[in-house]
Image: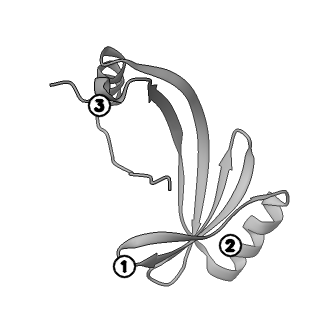
Amino acid sequence: MVQELKIRIHNNQSIEEQLLKNGAKFINQTYFVDTYFNQPSGKVLKIVEKNKGASINIFHAINGKFNVIKDEQIENLEELKKQYTSEHGIKRIMKGTRKFFQFTDKESAFPS
């Protein structure tokens, strides 16, 4: 199962240089807009807009981890945004980029 770790990096250029220096290959860069809607504690409802379209994500917290309840592509982006904004209100909008790097030799990711 794929897991995701989210961290704030204050000097991303330095991290990218270290990745490349240690054998990583730059794969891809994507742009996103994540719109989070107000939900009860332990629940997440968001619409994700990316280069390849939009999707709706619903997560529930269970035992300190978030379980995916729904993750599917949507066609009616603006209609759903209006509906969820009306029903729940917007909690936060996050915009940014994601850069993907890959190690062909996992040992090179962790120099001694």
Q: Counting residues from the N terminus, which is met first, the one under dot 2 or under dot 3?
A: 3
Q: CA distance from mark 2 to mark 3?
A: 34 Å
From the viewer's perspective, is the residue at label 1 or at label 3 nearer? 1
The label shown at residue 49 is none
Q: Is residue 23 left or right of residue 28?
A: left
Task: Find numbered disc 2 in the image and state the secondary structure of the residue it sits on.
Answer: helix
- Local SS, label 3: loop
Mark closer to the observer (2, 3): 3
Which amino acid type is marked by label 3? Asn
> Residue at coordinates 52% horizontally, 41% vertically from top-left?
96
User: Answer yes or no: do the residues labelled 1 and 2 have beta carbons within 8 Å?
Assistant: no
The residue lying at 73 percent from left, 65 percent from top is 81
In the foreground, 55 or 80: 55
Measuring 60% from the left and 60% from the top, which residue is drawn there? 35
Q: Report x, y in % for residue 99.
A: 49, 32
Residue 24 relative to residue 88: left or right: left
- The quarter of the image holding the C terminus is top left
Q: Earlier in the sequence, mark 1 or mark 3?
A: 3
Which residue is label 2 attached to? Answer: 85
Amino acid residing under circle 2: Thr
Q: Where does label 3 land, which residue?
A: 11
Residue at which label 1 appears: 63
**For this rendering, which residue is in front, 5 or 37?**
5
Residue at x 70%, y 74% (from the top left corner): 84
